[in-house]
Image (tube, grey):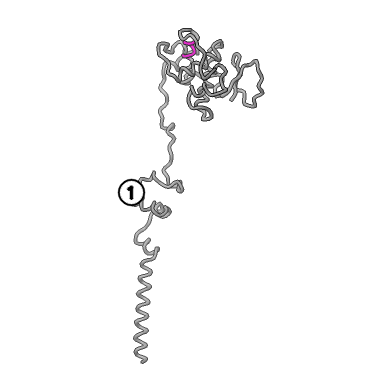
Amino acid sequence: MSRKLDIASAIAVALTLGFTLVSADGSGAAAEARNPVSARQAILPQGAAASAAAGTPDNILPASYPELAAPRVNPRDEMPPPPVTEADDADSLAELVSEQSAAVEPSRELECLAGAIYFEAKSETLEGQLAVGRVVVNRARSGRFPASYCGVVYQPSQFSFIRGNAMPSFNRSSTAWQRAVALAQIADEGSWTSQAEGALYFHAARVSPGWRMKRVARIDNHVFYR
């Protein structure tokens, strides 16, 4: 009877050792020792690691792991500097205006920009007209107003010359209109720095609306703010 118990005990010990070895071989620690897992795979959620193993590009990573994403490059950092043109060599704004091509029919957007210059400031100096044009350009690019020149100009309750969602009639062959188109081209291209650069608002100098904004400049009969 004692011999049978000894044999049974020996078999139990052998089975216990075998089970322990099998369990240790299947543990995460042992598997990691045989098949090292990269740090990138180790913290990816289930499914993402499988995608990585299948060859998913590094730039397709979950947003919850931004530290793994490739550095974002600002497209502007890779843009070449603007080419130097004759406009950059102009000695005065008047010279730059005269260099603009009057034969080119303005686009719809440029015509809206020229319209704002013409109706708001055609009796002003070139600097004053350019400043009005730059306000329209600044608004369209600010993200706070409509994203087009026509959208800015036709935005309700912004420009008093717009009546019934239309501009008044005007003589397109006049010198004042041709000058407004030339200044619209300059304002759009940014080829001449305005004295009111960065302005988003203006009003006639004869009124005092009490705006709590930063005053940028007064040019002719207009006061400009940002």
170 relative to 69, above or below: above
Quarter of the rendering containing residue 43: bottom left
Looking at the image, which is closer to me, 77 or 222? 222
23 relative to 158, above or below: below
The single residue placed furthest to the top in the displayed view is: 174
Which residue is found at the position 38% from the left and 70% from the top?
Answer: 23
Image: magenta residue range:
177-182
Which residue position is annotated with label 1?
Answer: 55
Which residue is found at the position 54% from the left and 17% from the top?
Answer: 163
Q: Is residue 223 left or right of residue 140?
A: right
17 relative to 84, above or below: below
Q: In this view, does 48 lie to the left or right of 149?
A: left
Which residue is found at the position 61% from the left and 14% from the top?
Answer: 221
Looking at the image, which is closer to me, 108 or 199? 108
Horizontal and vertical percent position of residue 155? 53, 24
Quarter of the rendering containing residue 198: top right
Residue 180 included in the magenta stretch of the image: yes
- Label 1 neighbour load within 10 Å: few <14, some 14-19, many 20+: few
Residue type beneath disc 1: Gly
Question: Is residue 201 shown to the viewer in this render?
Answer: yes
Q: In this view, does 202 lie to the left or right of 46?
A: right
Horizontal and vertical percent position of residue 166? 51, 17
Horizontal and vertical percent position of residue 25? 36, 67
Looking at the image, which is closer to me, 52 or 210? 210
Question: Is residue 92 shown to the viewer in this render?
Answer: no
Horizontal and vertical percent position of residue 224? 59, 21
Count of labels shown? 1
Main structural element of the magenta stretch: helix, strand or loop?
A: helix
Looking at the figure, which quarter contains the N terminus?
A: bottom left
Looking at the image, which is closer to me, 16 or 120? 120
Looking at the figure, which quarter contains the C terminus?
A: top right
The single residue placed furthest to the left in the displayed view is: 54
